[in-house]
Image: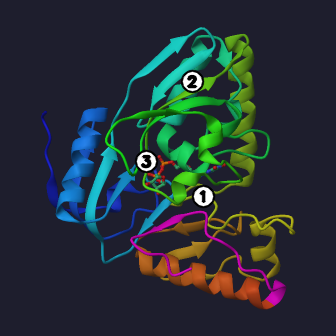
Amino acid sequence: MDLQVKENISLREFTTFRTGGPAKYFAEAKTAQEMHYLREFAVKRQIPFVILGMGSNVLFLDEGYPGLIIHNKMSRMQIQGDRVTVEGGVNLTKMILIAAQHNLGGLSGLANIPGTVGGAVYGNAGIPDVCISDVLTHAVILPGHGDKPVIVGPEYFQFGYRHSKLKKNKDIVLSATLKMRMEPSVKIRAEIGQYIRERAAKQPVGNTCGSFFKNPSQFPSAGWLIDQAGCKGMQEGDAIVSPKHANFIINTGNAASKDILTLALKIHQKVKDKFNVNMEPEVQILPLSPF
Ligand SMILES: Cc1cc2nc3c(=O)[nH]c(=O)nc-3n(C[C@H](O)[C@H](O)[C@H](O)COP(=O)(O)OP(=O)(O)OC[C@H]3O[C@@H](n4cnc5c(N)ncnc54)[C@H](O)[C@@H]3O)c2cc1C
């Protein structure tokens, strides 16, 4: 095994917010065996660990992470009939585009969601039309309490809106098998193009993690609540509430995680004051969320 555990690695370049302090330990896992070994590295030292995909849904605090970051670089993908089996570290968009070349669609709406397949399963990534749980037939996980990889079906994950059971345990997604829809590649590509255009019209670009808060069920959306509470354009250091989409916080330059978090807490309070709703963050705040 050619494994290198580095120390004191800045997490800034590994998240789409481009903020965060250093990880005490940092290593890449390219195989299930390496993933297992690295988890043991953390367990033996009694330090916390976290699996990192593309970092498009995490905010690491400026103090850094006091344990081991395992950067998921597992990258194999296999197609059999209408099934795609893909390792957790594979880029979701890349997987959807490769499947499209094989006339396999059904996930076009997810083609522009930044992240890995493992991250998508963890948070049941999706849009109102479709989410990853709609097509997942089974997955191979390394259970939080167990040494051997286990095959589990979709029911195992207790999927919900931006939710899976993985948010409550320490299971690691090694691979996922997805049942795709057989259709002409040209049709899939046109669909993907349409979704990308729609997204570009609604969402800002920049250093962000996308929607910061989940949509509370009894209101149109978190973005609507934040807008109505008068938060659009609010700023903390270089962190701003996007004027284009109120649920997007953007790091416009050199924001620290503290700026993003302070802004998020202010937004949360303003919405609470106006609507008496406690919004829940969609972004994972590590090592400890103040929400
Ligand atoms: C511009 C933008 C737009 C976005 N739009 C959407 C959208 O439309 N819909 C949507 O659902 N999301 C959206 N997101 C959020 C984000 O893209 C998704 O949550 C994505 O699935 C995160 O994947 P990741 O690999 O980057 O995960 P990370 O951010 O690296 O990790 C997120 C969490 O998943 C866990 N995790 C990652 N991999 C594994 C694994 N293999 N096993 C176990 N746990 C794991 C991590 O430990 C962490 O807790 C958007 C983000 C951005 C920046």
Q: Tell me which corner region of the image, top left, top right, bottom left or bottom right, holds residue 36.
A: top left
| Beta carbon of the mark 3 residue lies under 8 A of ligand 1 | yes
Tell me how far mark 2 sits from mark 3, CA to CA. Answer: 17 Å
Regarding mark 1 in the picture, which secondary structure is present there? loop
Residue 28 sits in which quadrant?
Answer: top left
User: Above or below — where is 270 with respect to 183?
Assistant: below
Residue at position x 66%, y 21% from top? 180
Q: Specify the segment rendered in magenta.
A: 274-291
Task: Specify the amino acid type for callout 3.
Answer: Met
Residue under circle 3? 54
Residue at 51% in and 38% down: 117
- What is the C-alpha distance between the residues marked 2 and 1? 21 Å
User: Callout 3: few (<14), some (14-19), or many (20+) C-alpha neighbours within 10 Å?
Assistant: many
Looking at this view, is 45 or 281 the one in front?
45
Q: Using the rendered view, name the quadrant where residue 221 is placed.
A: bottom right
Given the image, on which type of amino acid does mark 1 rest? Answer: Gly
| Of the pair 125 and 145, the residue shown nearer to us | 145
Mark on residue 210?
Answer: 1
Q: Quadrant of the N terminus?
A: top left
Q: At label 2, which amino acid type do we have?
A: Leu
Q: Of callouts 1 and 3, which one flags the residue occurring earlier in the amino acid sequence? A: 3
Magenta span contains residue 124: no
Q: Secondary structure at mark 3?
A: loop
Pointers 1 and 3 in contact (C-beta within 8 Å): no
Q: Which residue is mark 2?
A: 97
Q: Is residue 284 magenta?
A: yes
Circle 2 crowding by C-alpha within 10 Å: few under 14, some 14–19, many from 20: many
